[in-house]
């Protein structure tokens, strides 16, 4: 079962997950992080800023979950730019060790396989951060995505494009295609940490954690993974049937278990 941690707000969630990432890096200086974009992981990156002072991050590697296809990598809303701005620069990571899928049109048909090869060559992802879309997508794996899928090009749903229009001048500027780690790729990471905040994510979280395992709600793939931590605020937890049990588990968690 996924461990569900219900916290009062996003900053406390960010602090909890940042502590775990620092522990991982101290333990494995060459740790491989799976980085997520969107607004949800920002409190984690924010909390990491102060915690990483004095920690050697020179060997930390990172792989972003996804990228838009056909967007100029220098566009401020390309996930390459977002990861550089929100993660690489503030945390002092080595840019050459942090990759995003290559969304440029030239060579796009091989970009997925190349990304998979790079993840494998790095020894796999140790800790994968995940947000969740209102339609239950993780990465950009929209409803219907195969649980065995690898990094590949997908078409965004109208809902995702509308959700992400806030980052662009209009919905028409949101790219139609993306390249994303597959659900199979995500399931190969050693530890999944899914975060969600706010009422708007409550249905997606309930479906992912407690609903049937179905490609119609890609986030439900986490139920197939042996080590998952779901960190949510009260609003995002509001439709969880077993919320009281999760609180009980967390209160009584043996310290030796770690996150
Ligand atoms: C985008 C990203 C996802 C992210 C989702 C939710 O579509 N590709 O990785 O989880 O949005 O975004 P937010 O965290 O801003 O709600």
Image (tube, rainbow, N blue to C red):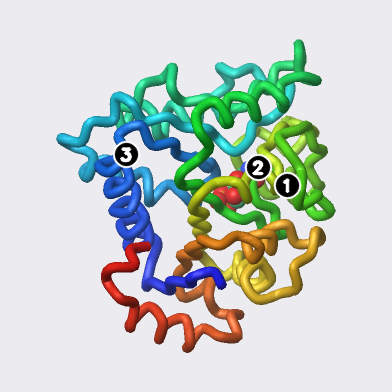
Identify which residue is drawn at 25% across, 42% down. Answer: 26
Could you tell me which secondary element the residue under label 1 belongs to?
Answer: loop
Identify which residue is drawn at 52% across, 57% down. Answer: 194
Residue 71 x, y percent position in the rendering: 68, 22
Residue bearing the label numbered 3:
28
Identify which residue is drawn at 81% across, 47% down. Answer: 158
Q: CA distance from mark 1 to mark 3?
A: 29 Å
Q: Are marks 1 and 3 in contact (CB under 8 Å)?
A: no
Dot 2: few (<14), some (14–19), or many (≥20) neighbours within 10 Å? many
Image position of 222 (left or right of 96): right
Q: Residue furthest top?
A: 106
Which quadrant, please, contains the N terminus? bottom right
Q: Which image quadrant is residue 170 in?
A: top right
Q: Which image quadrant is residue 87 in?
A: top left
Residue bearing the label numbered 1:
141
| Mark toward the start of the polypeptide (1 vs 3) | 3
Asked if the beta carbon under badge 1 is closer than 8 A to the nearest atom of ligand 1, the reply is no
Residue 238 x, y percent position in the rendering: 55, 79
């Amino acid at each position: 079962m996924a461990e569900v941690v219900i916290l009062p707000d996003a900053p406390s969630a960010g602090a909890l997950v940042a502590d775990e990432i620092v522990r991982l890096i101290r333990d494995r200086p060459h740790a491989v992080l799976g980085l997520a974009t969107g607004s949800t992981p920002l409190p984690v990156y924010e909390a990491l800023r102060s915690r990483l002072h004095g920690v050697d991050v020179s060997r930390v590697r990172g792989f972003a979950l996804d990228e838009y296809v056909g967007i100029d990598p220098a566009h401020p809303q390309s996930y390459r730019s977002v990861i550089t701005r929100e993660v690489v620069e503030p945390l002092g990571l080595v840019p050459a060790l942090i990759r995003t899928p290559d969304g440029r049109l030239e060579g796009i048909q091989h970009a997925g396989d190349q990304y998979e090869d790079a993840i494998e060559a790095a020894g796999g992802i140790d800790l994968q951060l995940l947000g969740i879309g209102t339609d239950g997508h993780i990465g950009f794996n929209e409803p219907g995505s195969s649980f065995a899928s690898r990094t590949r090009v997908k078409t965004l749903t109208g809902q995702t494009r509308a959700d992400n229009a806030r980052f662009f001048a209009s919905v028409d500027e949101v790219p139609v295609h993306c390249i994303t780690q597959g659900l199979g790729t995500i399931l190969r990471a050693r530890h999944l940490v899914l975060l969600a905040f706010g009422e708007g994510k409550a249905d997606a979280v309930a479906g992912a954690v407690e609903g049937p395992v179905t490609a119609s709600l890609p986030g439900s793939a986490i139920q197939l993974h042996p080590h998952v931590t779901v960190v949510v605020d009260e609003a995002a937890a509001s439709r969880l049937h077993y919320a009281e049990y999760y609180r009980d588990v967390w209160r009584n968690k043996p310290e030796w278990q770690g996150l």
